Amino acid sequence: MFETILIANRGEIACRVMETAQAMGVRCVAVYSDADAQAKHVAMADVAVHIGGSSPAQSYLRGDVIIRAALDTGAQAIHPGYGFLSENPDFVDAVEAAGLVFIGPSAAAIRAMGLKDAAKALMIEAGVPVVPGYHGADQDDALLADEAGKIGYPVLIKAVAGGGGKGMRLVEAAEGFQAALESARSEARTAFGNADVLVEKFVAKPRHIEVQVFGDGTDAVHLFERDCSLQRRHQKVIEEAPAPGMTPQMRRAMGDAAVKAAKAIGYAGAGTVEFIVDGSDGLSPDGFFFMEMNTRLQVEHPVTEMITGVDLVAWQLRVAAGEALPAAQEDLSITGHAFEARLYAEDVPAGFLPSTGTLTHLAFTPETRADSGVRAGDVISPFYDPMIAKVIVHGETRAVALSKLRAALAGCQVGGTVTNLAFLGALAGHEGFGRGQVDTGLIARDIEALTAVPAIQARHVAQAGMAALGLLEAGADAGFTLWRPLRRSVMLGWGEQQEVVKVRVLGPDRQIWSVGAQEVLAERGARGWTLDGQLAAQVTLSGGVVTLFEGYGMVFDVIDPLDRAAGAQGDGNLIEAPMPGLVRVMEAHVGQVVAKGDRLAVLEAMKMEHALLAARDGIVAEVLAATGDQVEAGAALVRLEAEADVEVAA
């Protein structure tokens, strides 16, 4: 076994690898960027090395600097985690050339699966079923359109490189093909530096089921399947294992196909073979098709660990150190059911916009396995993926595990940033999902219900006011001294609402709050405060923000009336950056006539591109940023002429 390894990653996966490695007696070296100097993975490591600036290109993608750090700290091996350099075959070659061990597959195996078109040709040769489509090298527009017609609409255009839904477009009919092709190529070129695409038949009611494989370079086994069908814009949201409705025959067929895929490339380490499954009429052994192979540990690997009892990171270390496969296929079995929900800092009502901020509070229920790379006090930065944690549960049956997931999500407490927690809770409570009726279109079909904002009642507003005014811990003199008035008020904001709420303090244990036309009675008894008879929620106050931990978290801003008056003078014609990021493309130019919904700029932040659109018809008066500029949240990018000015000019 290795004495020292370097983890060439950050956040949750770096912490996850360290937990297992350190438990095995292995010394761990962390690397970190400027933005991560105080990060959790740095604090956990035995040694930490600074490798550069905050952006990945300045730090976590600098393979030469990472290899030098490994050599300087006495590491014998490098674990890549996932993302960044984990599937970069040139990095693997460089690691091995430096005399180090790469904890993962060979460069040849990564190259074999790195391009979807070449991988599918290899899978056909290995006897693995693939989706009907065009995977050729000829990228002529007319040829691709002709092939789409032969396949039959609807079709999917997919970038041959990369993943995560980037460079992917669904085309329903021939007339939309060219525009979708141009859009997919543009996104693929930006994300992967490769604009080539393939065209495939779109499966009408698809399920995304993947199989965990593990090899030692000669032999391979599978550790059963995971269902990752709950997706939004091709991004996984909740994963589970095993897949609902899976039959022994289907499991055997998919497992055998996945092992064939792994053996075909002499795979070593943990990998995932992803299949698209036709779920229109139940699961059938002839109804699944190879999509791609991820030649690394997957984000959702914990659900496999929970049902098999296998520590996949421990297996990775053992095989990379020269051991054979730790178990034979017949030694592996499934126990119970597991779920994983991805908790993100994102503003769901604003269209799932990634969010930044300092985590003022972070807590999970004792029964939850929470894999996280952040702690209270840490910053969600604009430079990396905004994941806060993976919420993982296990139960004896799917119904028990789902019940545990609902309780785990209800018990999550996150302060300091908006999250997708209510969205995850709505998904966990979705009737169809509860029955195991899952497919990749479920979220899109029910998006309005799933993203509905939890109702905020007068008692919630009153408790936020209590926190803002320091009245949750009111002493015996509250409201009865010359220095503490009997009547007080505070201005609160939540959602689109702002309101001045008022209180009459009747004693240390009794308050009456006026919230609009409603009155709320707050009383303190043996169990603590109640508001209109309902027990008060836990609450935090930080930096003028009150967070109530009820209904998956309710956030209230404490507003200074002077700030509100100043804000009312702002220019409503400005298009502003919704978060810190890089202006990837500035399309607007002075004098341009734009219509509502026209794209004016593209902002890159948190590994995603965000189109900034004109909110109304108008004329561009000023362009205040250029392509390549790094901007802060709220920075003015484009200003439209005032509507009155346009009318006069007309």
Image (tube, rainbow, N blue to C red):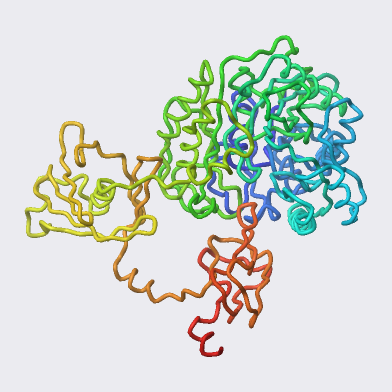
- Residue at 84% of width from left, 23% of height from top? 260
The residue furthest bottom is: 649
- Residue at 75% of width from left, 30% of height from top? 273
Residue 30 image-quadrant placement = top right
Q: In front here: 354 or 444?
A: 444
Vertical order, 203 against 147 (above or below): above
Q: In which quarter of the image is the N terminus?
A: top right
Q: In which quarter of the image is the C terminus?
A: bottom right
The residue furthest top is: 330
Is residue 155 shown left or right of residue 643? right
Q: In front here: 518 or 45?
A: 518
Vertical order, 470 against 363 (above or below): below
Residue 222 x %, y %: 74, 20
Q: Can residue 350 be seen in this view?
A: yes
Vertical order, 622 against 84 (above or below): below
Residue 527 x %, y %: 20, 32
Q: In front here: 68 or 537?
A: 537
Total tally of numbered discs in the picture: 0
Residue 249 x %, y %: 73, 15
Residue 103 x %, y %: 75, 31
